[in-house]
Amino acid sequence: MSRFKNLDYFLFIPYIIMSVIGIIMVYSASANIGIQNGGSPLSYFKKQLFYVILSVIIVVLMSRFKLSKLRNKQFLSSLEIIFFVVLVGLLAFGATINGAAGWIRVGPFSLQPAEFVKFFLIIRLANIIDAKQDIITRSAADWWGQLWPTMVRCGILIILIFAQPDAGGAAINFAIVFVIFMTSGISWKKAVSFLFGGVVLVYAAINFILVPMSKSSMFSNSYQLQRIIAFTNPFGHATGAGQQLVNSYYAISNGGLFGVGLGNSVQKTGYLPEPNTDFIMSILTEELGAIGAICVMALLTFIIARTVLLGIRSNSTYQSLICYGVATYLTIQTLFNMGGVLGALPITGVTFPFISYGGSSILTLSLCLGLVLNVSNRQREARRALQATTN
């Protein structure tokens, strides 16, 4: 019980509430799928329950973990090599799910290494930048000279993820790297210019490269490019590439303000593909209404805001960068998922944090949230020590 007593409840309680909502919604959204696949309506529910119980254990353990062990150079280097080898191997031997060969099957479970790369990049970059903080803050030349080898290695990992192909995972990992580098001591003017340049490049790539490619017969069978077609003209391809988005619109429209009631979704009964993963928020909105979706978004926003606040309060560069990296991970993944559900962004296949079905995502999120709770515990202990010396 002492492990739970010292937890930051401003983070832990919203996390538990969202996880419980996730278990309920996964059961609601997947029961029909389980029956259609010839299995039990409880099959996805049982797996999700297992993942959540395991994630709570991981969060609690990580909150008390010695950060010095995560900062061990040999450990980080070994982990980096493992990810390189695994990601290269997945291109040739990975199990393919939804067009991406980025999965490792372990019995009835499937693991997605690209998810765990997010956690690795956060702890790796935070450690490197903290160790070289005095040097990289002197000038732009020192910043580039010290960090370019790390940027190249991160870039290779992201390219390997993109090649699976997993554009959503690659984009989230890129955002994590980008934000951590931009908060490493570089001037805010350069940070803003890099951010603006990145947004322009992404916009140009979608509109002037990917969209024309999606209209070409040469790439008509590309799963990823079909998602671009769905984004640009969903109702023109309502029975094909645009099926998910069109039925997502129907689900949200059916839900209205207060929803049709838990378990009463129509779109989950064979109309909306992936109702328990990528598009679970469509089902949640249909059943619980816009009010329910807003409550879930508010809980997640609170977790993100609390994480950023802990980063601002920290006197340790390492701990601050961990918080900023985790906050970026949660924010970008949420924006990508909701952007796809609402048709504001191309469908990227990423899950909604803590709500969607998916073991790799839940376990990675638990590792990251456990780190933030660890930072919070250290700040609390530092305040107690300061009070003890002043009394």
Image: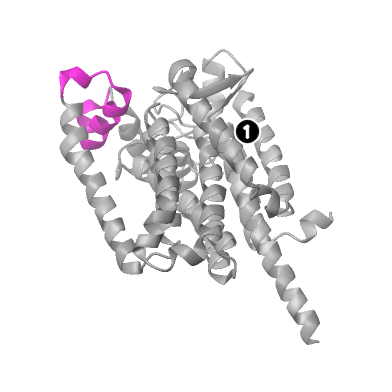
Q: Position of residue 143 (x, y in %)?
A: 40, 60
Q: Is residue 334 left or right of residue 39?
A: left
For the view shown, which residue lies furthest in the right direction? 1
Amino acid carrying mark 1 in the image: Gln
Q: Is residue 165 visible?
A: yes
Q: Which residues are magenta?
A: 216-239
Q: In this orientation, which residue lies closer to the viewer: 192 or 252? A: 192
In the figure, 39 relative to 230: above or below?
above
Q: Position of residue 185 (x, y in %)?
A: 43, 65
In the figure, 39 relative to 341: above or below?
above
Residue under label 1: 48
Q: Position of residue 100 (x, y in %)?
A: 41, 24
Q: In this orientation, which residue lies closer to the viewer: 61 or 149? A: 149
Residue occupying the point 60% across, 15% down: 39
Q: Quadrant of the N terminus?
A: bottom right
Q: Is residue 347 left or right of residue 106?
A: left
Q: Magenta segment: does it hold 228? A: yes
Q: Position of residue 164 (x, y in %)?
A: 40, 26
